[in-house]
Image (cartoon, rainbow, N blue to C red):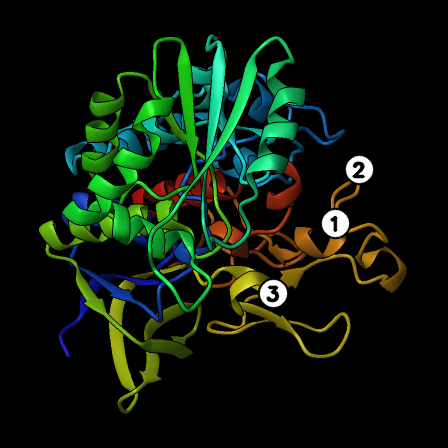
């Protein structure tokens, strides 16, 4: 098999972005992909930094990044790369017909599937909750048989978030799909069909009106192109806002398809259903990785490798025995608190970061793994996304932000 300039291992946000940016550098890129990545579990919005170390909401993401600890990935990535990465992402999705709104200077707001407000940095227009702030009436639309979306709970929580001076109305529509519980993806497919859209519109149109905002689950089509959203806004004549949703995440899948479309246009070779198993190393340089899956193992040679395997959350890093971390492809050293009593907080959703979430590969300012003395371990391997140590993406709401910006930095290195 022909040699590539860059091999990217992993197909989440970090992996796809690393491949795209590498291709834009004129490199021949191969992406090793297994499954759908984390996109079905991913909100598809770009949380850059939602909360600081004290759990306080960050109003200005770029200022919040400046206050992160020295070992945080953002400090290794650097502010110029963070800013450039955000602009690169916005241009990429806009070119694919799925523009995101927002900037590093202020947070945007979205509505969760339980009716609370959550800060984020970049999001699709259909999820922009700020349209609700000036509305006089909020109409929450439920779907009969849809799992994990309860209109009364959403209305109650939204009243706490947006204020009791607004009117809150609920309505439930019927998809006429019977025999099983529905996911948002099922309903999104129904709504994007001509028949389903007509039935959906007929059941909610009398709820529309001036000064109203219509809140719907994440069901406005499976494709990242705003076709269903734009049509519904026009037909209703008022604001429409999608909430986030439980997996499978429709918006995560939209973003994946948009990024894969961009990859295809750039001629990036995607090898599907393969797992990188081991590296071929000569001295301090990797010459190839071996990857297998549904077919026999193949060797993929390259000058540069970008590791985007998702850390603990996707099996890129494991710990079979307590304290014995293992990075699964290159055997890179992993750092983390190995005192068992401190490894996890008693409360999962606590007021401080989880030690296990902070574990990962220690890197230098170029995102290459280093040992305890700061020496580069493998000079042509770059580490991105949740493989990195020093941050708790869930506590901070920084997961896709670190993924995007570290991928950009590694691809440019």
Q: Position of residue 50 (x, y in %)?
A: 58, 29
Q: Is residue 49 left or right of residue 20?
A: right
Label whose residue precedes the other's in the sequence (2 or 3):
3
Reading the image, the residue beneath label 1 is: 354
Q: Residue at x 73, y 30 (%)?
A: 55
Reading the image, the residue beneath label 2 is: 351
Mark pair 1, 3: CA separation: 20 Å
Between 296 and 352, the one lying in front of the other is 352
Mark pair 2, 3: CA separation: 29 Å
Q: Residue at x 49, y 20 (%)?
A: 138
Mark pair 1, 2: CA separation: 9 Å
Count of marks placed on residues: 3
Q: Nearer the viewer, mark 1 or mark 2?
A: 2
Mark 2 crowd level (few <14, some 14–19, many ≥20, 10 Å Cα): few
Between 48 and 143, the one lying in front of the other is 143
Label 2: which secondary element: loop
Between 393 and 297, the one lying in front of the other is 393
Q: Residue at x 61, y 8 (%)?
A: 165
Does 216 appear above or below 143? above
Q: On residue 333, which mark appears?
A: 3
- Res. 280 in view: no
Q: Is residue 52 left or right of residue 7?
A: right
* Quadrant of the rendered image containing residue 297: bottom left
Label whose residue precedes the other's in the sequence (1 or 3):
3
* Quadrant of the rendered image containing residue 4: bottom left
Q: Position of residue 164 (x, y in %)?
A: 65, 13
Label 3: which secondary element: loop
Q: Residue furthest right?
A: 341
């Amino acid at each position: 098999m022909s040699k590539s300039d860059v091999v990217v291992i992993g197909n989440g946000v970090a992996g796809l972005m690393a491949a795209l940016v590498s291709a834009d550098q004129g490199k021949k890129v191969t992406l090793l992909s297994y499954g759908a990545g984390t996109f079905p579990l991913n909100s598809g919005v770009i949380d850059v930094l939602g909360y600081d170390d004290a759990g306080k909401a960050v109003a200005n993401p770029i200022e919040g990044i400046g206050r992160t600890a020295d070992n945080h990935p953002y400090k290794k990535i650097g502010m110029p790369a963070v800013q450039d990465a955000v602009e690169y992402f916005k241009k990429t999705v806009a070119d694919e017909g799925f523009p995101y709104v927002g900037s590093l200077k202020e947070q945007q707001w979205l509505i969760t599937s339980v009716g609370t407000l959550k800060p984020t940095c970049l999001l699709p227009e259909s999820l922009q909750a700020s349209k609700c702030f000036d509305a006089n009436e909020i109409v929450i639309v439920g779907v009969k048989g849809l799992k994990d979306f309860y209109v009364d709970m959403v209305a109650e929580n939204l009243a706490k978030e947006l204020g009791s001076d607004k009117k809150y109305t609920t309505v439930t529509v019927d998809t006429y799909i019977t025999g099983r519980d529905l996911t948002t993806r099922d309903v999104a497919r129904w709504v994007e069909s001509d028949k389903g859209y007509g039935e959906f519109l007929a059941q909610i149109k009398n709820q529309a009106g001036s000064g109203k905002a219509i809140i719907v689950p994440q069901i406005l089509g499976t494709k990242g192109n705003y076709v269903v959203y734009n049509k519904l806004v026009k037909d209703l004549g008022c604001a429409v806002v999608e909430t986030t949703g439980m997996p499978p995440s429709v918006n995560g899948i939209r973003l994946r398809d948009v990024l894969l479309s961009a990859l295809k246009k750039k001629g990036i070779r995607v090898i599907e259903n393969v797992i990188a198993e081991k590296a071929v190393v000569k001295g301090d340089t990797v010459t190839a990785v071996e990857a297998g899956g549904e077919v026999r193992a193949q060797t993929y040679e390259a000058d540069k490798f970008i590791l985007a395997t998702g850390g603990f959350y996707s099996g890129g890093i494991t710990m079979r025995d307590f304290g014995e971390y293992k990075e699964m492809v290159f055997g890179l050293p992993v750092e983390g608190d190995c005192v068992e009593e401190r490894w996890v907080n008693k409360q999962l959703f606590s007021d401080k970061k989880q030690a296990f979430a902070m574990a990962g590969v220690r890197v230098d300012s170029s995102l290459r793994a280093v040992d305890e003395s700061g020496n580069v371990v493998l000079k042509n391997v770059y580490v991105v996304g949740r493989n990195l140590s020093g941050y708790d993406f869930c506590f901070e709401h920084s997961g896709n932000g670190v993924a995007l910006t570290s991928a950009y930095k590694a691809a440019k290195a």
